[in-house]
Image: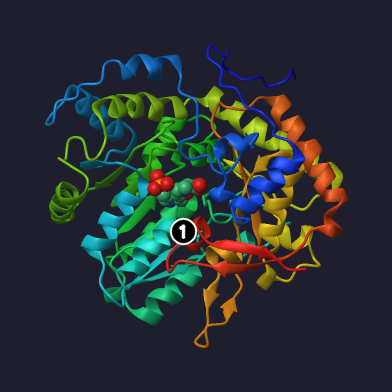
Amino acid sequence: MHTIIEPFRIKMTEPIKLISAADRKKALQRAKHNVFLLDAEDCCIDLLTDSGTGAMSTEQWAALMLGDESYAGSKSWKKFEATVRKITGIKHIFPTHQGRAAEGILAQTRLKKGDVIPNNSHFDTTRANIEFVGARAVDLLCNEGYDTTLEAPFKGNMDINKLERCIAEFGAAKIPFCMITVTNNTGGGQPVAMENIRAVKTALKKYGIPLVIDACRFAENAYFIHEREAGYRGKTLLEIAREMFSYADAANMSCKKDGLANIGGFLICNDDAWAEDFRNALILREGFPTYGGLAGRDLEVIAVGLMEALDYDYQVYRHATVEYLGRKLLARGIPFVRPVGGHAVFLDAKAFLPHIPPRQYPGIGLVNALYLAGGIRSVELGSVMFGKKDERGREIPAPLELVRLAFPRRVYTQSHFDYLIEVLDEVWNNRKQIPGYRITYQPKFLRHFTCQFEIID
Ligand code: F0G
């Protein structure tokens, strides 16, 4: 078979540069050792996130010019609505400025103190929105999902027994809805099988609990189902996506991922009463229901992007890039979550840096080492992002200490990844010198974005 090539050519470029090692050191010190606080222009290859960082297609740039900026009922809204409905089949559609706005509206309108929301794994903003209203976010990921070295096709699945136990423990009345995140970002970008979504829905139906899909990477999940689940080879990704959404009562979406857009999101539902609440909250926070915090041109771009994300050749290429990095890591014995995820490779910082205890944040050690060695920006998904506190205020480490190398869509080429692998080699060979960190400042919520660190000698 020939090399799987980028299914596009490049018409516009954006310069990147590698500042000197001494300047990287100074920049990281200025950022208090938190890469979120770095200037983007000081990062050579920015793998902080795949969110809103993708490159638009010619079709999207053309659509941008068609943006109808009418306040209400614009043509762009009509296209957006029709596309979201075509993919999801869901009745009520509300645009939002990004995913967390949809989560916020969902949490504020449907949850109260003491409620419990199960998920395979909550993403940080989802968890924060739930906890902000006094409800509890519980993760019910299948056990396979916690074993970073196990090769299994659907490690993002929810454990149905854990779900049954959760409902038995808290009671259906305390569970206004259950979520499932496709793909499971927090747990290595691993997919969820159609069979699992169906089983979750069946389990919930007995208790009348609605299912909400966190759909940020729905197209990547559809691709995995196509490749890995029996019975889906002959189907298009659109057909698979439609089936996924057919089990959902509602969904929240960040169009910054599989909308192939730089901004945007939506919240959708079938229930008329939910829709009424969403609409009112939307008008208060985001804007009129036909634009929801977005410009008409954004709605245009998303309508095109959502369909491009369901293009099979695009997904083949996208997955080939992630696999490429995974194969190189495997050959070197560098520990990472296997198999590779849909949007990222997740390094296992606990195995990479066994000399750093979890309370000294091995993930931060690795993130900072990658920046210092080669100007690569990555992100910790470990105890800084997901750690909890016990009653005495002592930190309970997260179950996994991961470092995510997220792949912006259609942005970097193979030589960028070859360079990344060279940097990883260097960091791997010098890993014993990497220090642990302590936190010197942290805010109350979502601390990883703005907290500050110092090196532990
Ligand atoms: N749900 C999941 C699974 C996500 O990955 C994200 C964002 C959100 C919800 C919130 O969407 O950013 O548009 O408000 N994830 C990004 C990331 C930020 O880097 O993984 P948003």
- Is residue 440 at least partly visible in the picture? yes
From this view, report whether residue 41 is shown above or below residue 269: above
Using the image as rendered, state which of residue 134 and residue 196 is in the foreground: 134
For the residue pair 190 and 22, the one nearer the viewer reads as: 22
Residue 387, located in which quarter of the rendered image? bottom right
Left or right, residue 454 beside residue 161? right
For this rendering, which residue is in front, 72 or 155?
72
Image color mode:
rainbow
- Which residue occupies the foreground of this view, 315 or 163? 315
Instruction: Name the residue: 34% across, 38% down.
Output: 264
Which residue is painted at 84% across and 44% down in the image? Answer: 426
> Callout 1: 10 Å neighbours few (<14), some, many (20+)?
some
Q: Residue furthest right?
A: 429
User: Given the current orientation, which residue lies at the most extreme bottom position?
Assistant: 392
* 242 w.r.t. 205: above or below: above
Counting from the top left corner in percent of width and height, residue 126 is at 40, 58
Q: Is mark 1 within 8 Å of ligand 1?
A: yes
Against 197, is 174 above or below? below
Q: Position of residue 376 (x, y in %)?
A: 68, 40
Q: Quadrant of the C terminus?
A: bottom right
Q: Amino acid at mark 1?
A: Asp
Work out whether residue 337 can be spotted: no
**Where the N terminus falls, by quadrant?**
top right
Dot 1 corresponds to which residue?
124
| SS under mark 1 | helix
